[in-house]
Image (cartoon, rainbow, N blue to C red):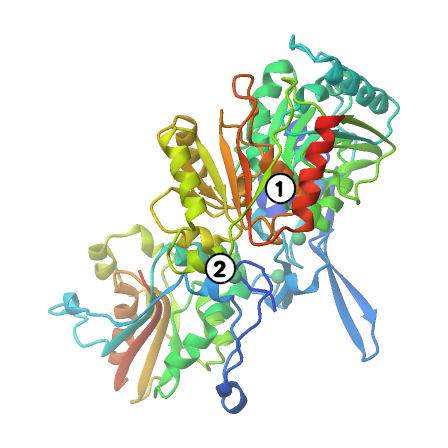
Amino acid sequence: MKEQLQQFLTGRIWLREHTPFPCEAIDAHIESGHIHLKPGIQTDEDQAFFGQLKKYVCNRCHNTTQHLFHTFHCARCNKNCTYCRHCIRMGRVSSCSELLLWNKEHVSYANDHEFAWNGQLTPLQQKASEELLTSVEQNKSHLLQAVCGAGKTELLFPSIFQCLKQGKRVCVAAPRTDVILELFPRFQKVFPKTTIHALYGGAPDQEGFAELILATTHQLYRFEQAFDVVFVDEADAFPYYADETLQRAVKKAAKQDAAIHYVTATPTKTLQTTNQSILSRRYHGHDLPVPRFDSLWGYARQLNKGKVPIKLQQWIEEKTNTSTPFLVFLPTIEMLENFPGDLPRVHAEHPDRKELVMKLREKKIPGLLTTTILERGITIENVHVAVVGAEQKIFTSSALIQISGRVGRSFQYPTGDIVFFHHGISREMDKAQAAIEGWNRS
Amino acid sequence: MNCLICGTAFQPTPTWRLLFVYEKESSTCSRCYSKFTKSDATIEFNDFQGTVYEGAVDAITALYSYNEAMKSYLHQYKFLQDVALAQVFAKTLHEAFEGKEGSVVPIPMHPEKLVKRTFAQVDELLNSAGIPFQHMLAKTATSEQGKKTRKERLEASPLFEVTARIEARNYILFDDIYTTGATIHHAAKLLKDAGATRVDAITLIKG
Ligand SMILES: [Zn+2]
Ligand SMILES: [Zn+2]
Ligand SMILES: [Zn+2]
């Protein structure tokens, strides 16, 4: 039992009610000092101008946004009890909950890892990969800026293998579950002897001690001082760049002196690293498709009246008639839900997102309407893309770059149409276009 | 103000009523709230005619119907124990009880289950709507209603016992969800047998 507890709890900060172990075993290890307890919510009393002001901190997700705490009269502790709404989907953490941490000697890592990859890197990939490896060996943070479709996952393999060989515990984190699900089988193939766990909301229980963890950044709320090295993939993806608690979660999950490396297509200003590499070519060597701008004046009004603007209608018809799979990105869920006609549509709350994307790949449906949820992580051969309302705030330059990056990813179809339909050109649209043109020149 | 369900910031629409009468501000944005379906339906319960429960309840009203949005609401409120969500229906509940005569009696939870869940979801709905209530029943059986057939539920020994003095007055039972009706009828019969003049029932949802 001790071994299992140790394997499970090492590096974790875990809600007591949610452990898959018998209560007595936990108690015994608290008694022996192997498990350390932390209260779920910490209350700081601030001396404010008018008397005392309570300030809550969630000890799991480190949330400090006060409106995301709720206080109620609790029947378990029989007093006023406060819980964190921010991380509630992982099991509620309240004032009377206990968080478990493994206190004693950590698991010693097994050292036989195998590197079963015989793919070929292009010279550009090779160079970036070596630069990253150097930073990893020197434990210096590294930013790998790679255009969409550059083949960036392969670049990480040598660095990760190097760390594993040295007995380090490695984490590859990404903001979105879709990305983790895509990475998991690839990593399993490349590191066949390594225990790898994939952690995301709704993931099954996985046994043993994982030397390599692939996790959504959300899941890192449940780790503390766990990793010797962390790679954050898709660091420009929502919600990571916009959610400070996720950025803190990554730092909290890493050991004090561990370097954190980032992989991204569009670095945000907040990403500060010691070293960096740029990979501005796609693996197939072709230029990135450059978005074209086309005006669609008053599209919102027309769509509101149940009419598809004529240019957009023609675009959709042309793609349908030539059996070219297409994606139409819309700025809001309302616009998506109210879009006239019966084209299939997906958004974040949509349960069969994966099935619909699959159908599009298999050409069982002509195209898909989507919100920014499909901006990254998906590859559909020969897909053409239209953005409606590209001037709207939700379409940041990084979102627009990602969306454009869906086009022309395969060897067979390295080009394709990417059009920004707009009601006036925004700076973000210009920025996205300029960035893509810049990469093509370099 | 941030929507309790989706978290986005929104402007609650001010109403003139707010100035004069007690009215709860909405705690959810209009997009989230619009996904619930109001029913305000009077529930038919002819199926209890000819049983010992005939005449136990005088009228039953359900405020919302059960749909996807309600399903995920209940999941977050009851299963994830997000007590704050009790506020979502505060306004509707307040209006539903406005002008109704009778003491409000919530359907109780078993004490053991209450400690486990840490809050009584039925009571919290009333609390957040500012509706005064009094517990007059206590749950005796721990077994889950949901796992039984309707027949089994009706034939089961009483689910509750009366814990306060019932007078010859009106009472309004309140529960979160109406499914087979067994719970409400069991409770109503106890109140009637103990001397209640009239027993109505309001539930948040018609399952
Ligand atoms: Zn939290
Ligand atoms: Zn408590
Ligand atoms: Zn909302």
In this view of the protein, which residue sits in the foreground, A246 or A7? A246
Q: Nearer the viewer, mark 1 or mark 2?
A: 1
Q: Say which quadrant the C terminus of chain A sits in.
A: top right
**Image-quarter location of ligand 2:** bottom right
Residue at the far left: name it: B50
In this view of the protein, which residue sits in the foreground, B158 or A409? A409
Residues at marks 1 and 2, CA–CA distance in whole angstroms: 37 Å
Name the residue tied to disc 2.
Answer: B77
Query: Does B7 appear above or below A376?
Result: below
Name the residue tied to disc 1.
Answer: A400
In this view of the protein, which residue sits in the foreground, A334 or A428? A428
Tell me if I can see residue B10 in this picture: yes
Residue at image position (64%, 10%) is: A119
In this view of the protein, which residue sits in the foreground, B75 or A342? A342
Query: Does B77 appear above or below A295?
Result: below
What is the chain letter for disc 1? A
Q: Which mark is residue A314?
A: none
Residue A362 relative to residue A235: left or right: left
Q: Say which quadrant the N terminus of chain A sits in.
A: top right
Q: Residues within 10 Å of mark 1 (few under 14, many from 20)?
A: many
Residue at the far top: name it: A118
- Badge 2 amino acid: Tyr
Residue B185 relative to residue A211: left or right: left
Mark 2 residue element: helix
Query: Does A245 appear above or below B41?
Result: above
- Badge 1 amino acid: Leu
